[in-house]
């Protein structure tokens, strides 16, 4: 998929603000006013309900969640229930699939899994897909034991506005996994949530958060085209101008 | 003719989708690109946008229903030309009743309420559901005679949102022409551009003697080689792209909070056609010779008039030149074509007396003069680069060093 991706690192953003920003960028992308854009951020504790959520996948009452400082939000994305909190890297790739000649949402889900997986490899975590389930899971030599639950490290849910994507992935980097007790993640009872920090255990570097952001950023720039590539083309043009003649 | 909106193929392995939410209801007016419905498939929530501006006629699937790819989701009655055909020339106060065609929805409602459609007074060129419902309501309370009271057409888009005192009340003899989708698009773009960009203007008086000399010398050979006459426009495009290379700030867009100076120069040429204003784009205009520009401009303009342009040829301009032709008057300021930051508009080319110094003496001489007006977006472009750019265009045209 040829193209250029702009990456914007936004730090901690309230869920509602993140949604509003996504709307803005999606609208701009659809008008052709900005390039494909990856928003990288994290959210304060919040449980979000995808379009296909089931009520019994919320394990705590709304009151109990409020008491724990967890917000509740509905989101116009596919998928079931999910949980976001600081320490989880959330990525919203806003990409015009039509412009990239890639009008296939399932292929897009697989692309997201692959790019998040590539970032995990860079961090030293082995990953895998589980056929039939969307998301990124970790390879676990111990799970040969019968009945072991699949361990999920990143959730994926996507929205499409025309052919422009929104929402995306949530990669558990280093967060209190107890928050997931409020829900059945993505409606998968047989799934256990894990994080990069837990997988690396004592191999985890002190600056894991920053390293994870860089790994994700670089994986997406490799996969979807780096905007800077275009800046260097501009620099070449500058050369041509200084030499007095327009190129071509 | 109503358009059927189907569940699109969202991917090779996507065979069906579930209607999660309708975002419109029957009878709604929707603009092109407005989201109509949310459809969910595994892990994906897709919004299907309207392909054209129109009226939602009928929804054909229920929320929660799962439908296969290709299934019809709704029908949309486009607003536009075929409506215009049915508009009587001057009969604003009473649309013909018996002859007014009814929308299928209106027919359904009429049938359900036992109303004869020929009794219903349309509030527009067609009998709509609202007309039938109003007819039913009035019939219950008043004798039929009062139904024929004059009623202004509802929702003329041009005055949407205007306070009551600004609205025009139709007079007998007025001609009512519904806006075509193109007209509406142009209108929305103009308002958007004026609201978005603080327009500033500058005008250059340009002596085209040199260009006229080059053109006269090449005229016959060019006509023979290319089969059409060489006009002044390609010279202006050529000078403009060279000046844009020197002043990249004019070849830019504001993207969120950054100014993006574009690496490519694609010049939009505003062309007036029967259907209205269109702006086909000469791509990579900086890579074309003068003859190449002439070919491209001629090709786009003639295909614009014969309506043979593809949508792609109207997209992606980075700067625009408007040529109103022989009747361009002295000069005038065009509205910026968003998201660009500048537009040049040609005035008429007329012989005028100007002062020149000839052999050390000031003299009044007669020269072919073009007034060229630049409108620029002061959010992005300051006076210095804007004036520098326009002055450079003038220099290039007056130096007239053009190779064909």
Image (cartoon, coloured by chain):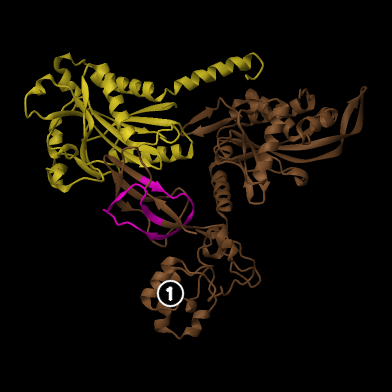
Q: How far from the left and from the top, in percent, is residue B33?
A: 45, 48
Q: Which residue is mark 1?
A: B134
Q: Is residue B262 left or right of residue B300?
A: left
Relative to B203, does residue B150 appear above or below in the rendering? below
Q: How far from the left and from the top, in percent, is residue A98?
A: 43, 36
Relative to A72, does residue B245 appear above or below in the rendering? above
* Disc 1: host chain: B
Residue B72 falls inside the magenta stretch: yes
Q: Colour of chain B?
A: brown
Q: Residue at x 77, y 35 (%)?
A: B227
Is residue A14 in view from this perspective?
yes
Q: Quadrant of the C terminus of chain B?
A: top right
Is residue B129 in view from this perspective?
no
Q: How far from the left and from the top, in percent, is residue A219?
A: 33, 21
Residue B42: image quadrant is: top left
Q: Nearer the viewer, residue A221 or B366?
A: A221
Q: Which chain is yellow?
A: A
Residue B8 falls inside the magenta stretch: no
Relative to B187, does residue A220 appear above or below in the rendering? above
Relative to B166, does residue A104 appear above or below in the rendering? above
Q: Is residue B145 left or right of residue B309?
A: left
Q: How far from the left and from the top, in percent, is residue B255?
A: 48, 33
Q: Around disc 1, counting alpha carbons within 10 Å, would you say few (fewer than 14), some (14 to 19), or many (20 or more)?
A: some
Q: Is residue B2 left or right of residue B378?
A: left
- Could you tell me which secondary element the residue under label 1 belongs to? helix
| Residue farthest to the left, as pictured | A146
Q: How many marks?
A: 1
Q: Nearer the viewer, residue B25 or B93?
A: B25
Residue A165: image quadrant is: top left
Q: Nearer the viewer, residue B153 or A147?
A: A147
Image: magenta residue range: B47-74
């Amino acid at each position: 998929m040829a193209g250029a991706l702009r990456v914007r690192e936004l730090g901690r953003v309230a869920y509602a603000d993140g949604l509003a920003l996504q709307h803005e960028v999606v609208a701009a992308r659809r008008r052709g006013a900005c390039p494909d854009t990856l928003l990288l951020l994290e959210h304060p504790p919040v449980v979000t309900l995808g379009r296909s959520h089931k009520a019994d996948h919320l394990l705590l009452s709304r009151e109990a969640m409020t008491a724990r400082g967890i917000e509740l939000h509905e989101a116009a994305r596919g998928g079931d229930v999910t949980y976001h909190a600081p320490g989880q890297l959330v990525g919203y790739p806003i990409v015009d699939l039509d412009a990239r000649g890639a009008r296939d949402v399932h292929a897009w889900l697989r692309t997201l899994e692959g790019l998040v997986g590539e970032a995990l490899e860079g961090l030293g975590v082995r990953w895998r897909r589980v056929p039939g389930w969307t998301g990124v899971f970790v390879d676990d030599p111990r799970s040969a034991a019968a009945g072991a639950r699949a361990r999920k490290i990143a959730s994926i849910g996507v929205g499409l506005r025309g052919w422009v994507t929104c929402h995306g992935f949530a990669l558990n980097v280093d967060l209190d996994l107890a928050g997931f007790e409020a829900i059945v993640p993505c409606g998968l009872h047989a799934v256990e949530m894990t994080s990069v920090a837990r997988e690396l255990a004592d191999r985890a570097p002190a600056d894991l958060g920053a390293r994870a952001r860089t790994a994700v950023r670089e994986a997406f720039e490799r996969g979807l085209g780096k905007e800077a590539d275009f800046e260097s083309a501009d620099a070449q043009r500058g050369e041509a101008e200084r030499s007095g003649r327009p190129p071509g | 003719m109503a358009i059927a909106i189907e569940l699109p193929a969202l991917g090779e392995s996507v065979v069906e989708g579930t209607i999660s939410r309708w975002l419109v209801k029957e009878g709604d007016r929707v603009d092109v690109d407005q989201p109509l419905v949310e459809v969910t498939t595994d892990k994906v929530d897709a919004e299907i946008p309207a392909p054209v501006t129109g009226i939602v006629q009928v929804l054909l699937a229920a929320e929660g229903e799962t439908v296969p790819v290709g299934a019809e989701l709704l029908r949309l009655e486009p607003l536009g030309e075929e409506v215009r055909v049915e508009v009587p020339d001057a009969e604003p106060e009473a649309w013909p009743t018996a002859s007014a065609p009814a929308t299928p929805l209106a027919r359904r409602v009429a049938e359900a309420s036992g109303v004869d459609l020929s009794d219903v007074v349309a509030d527009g060129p067609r009998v709509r559901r609202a007309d039938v419902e109003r007819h039913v309501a009035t019939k219950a309370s008043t004798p039929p005679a009062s139904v024929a009271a004059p009623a202004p057409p509802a929702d003329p888009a041009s005055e949407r949102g205007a306070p009551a005192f600004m609205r025009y009340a139709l007079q007998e003899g007025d001609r009512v022409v519904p806006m075509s989708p193109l007209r509406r698009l142009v209108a929305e773009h103009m308002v958007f551009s004026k609201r978005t960009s603080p327009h500033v203007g500058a005008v250059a008086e340009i002596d085209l003697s040199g260009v006229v000399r080059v053109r006269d010398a090449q005229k016959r050979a060019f006509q023979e080689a290319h089969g059409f006459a060489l006009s002044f426009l390609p010279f202006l495009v050529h000078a403009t792209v060279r000046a844009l290379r020197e002043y990249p700030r004019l070849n830019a867009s504001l993207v969120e909070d950054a100014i993006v100076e574009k690496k490519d120069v694609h010049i939009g040429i505003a062309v007036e056609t029967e259907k209205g204003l269109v702006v086909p784009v000469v791509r990579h205009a900086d890579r074309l010779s003068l003859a190449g520009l002439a070919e491209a401009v001629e090709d786009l303009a003639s295909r614009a008039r014969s309506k043979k342009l593809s949508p792609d040829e109207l997209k992606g301009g980075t700067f625009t030149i408007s040529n109103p032709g022989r009747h361009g008057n002295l000069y005038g300021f065009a509205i910026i074509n968003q998201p660009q930051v500048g537009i040049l508009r040609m005035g008429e080319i007329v012989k005028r007396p100007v002062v020149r110094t000839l052999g050390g003496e000031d003299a009044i001489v007669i020269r072919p003069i073009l007034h060229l007006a630049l409108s620029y977006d002061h959010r992005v472009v300051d006076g210095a680069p804007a004036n520098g750019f326009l002055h450079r265009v003038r220099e290039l045209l007056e130096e007239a060093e053009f190779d064909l």
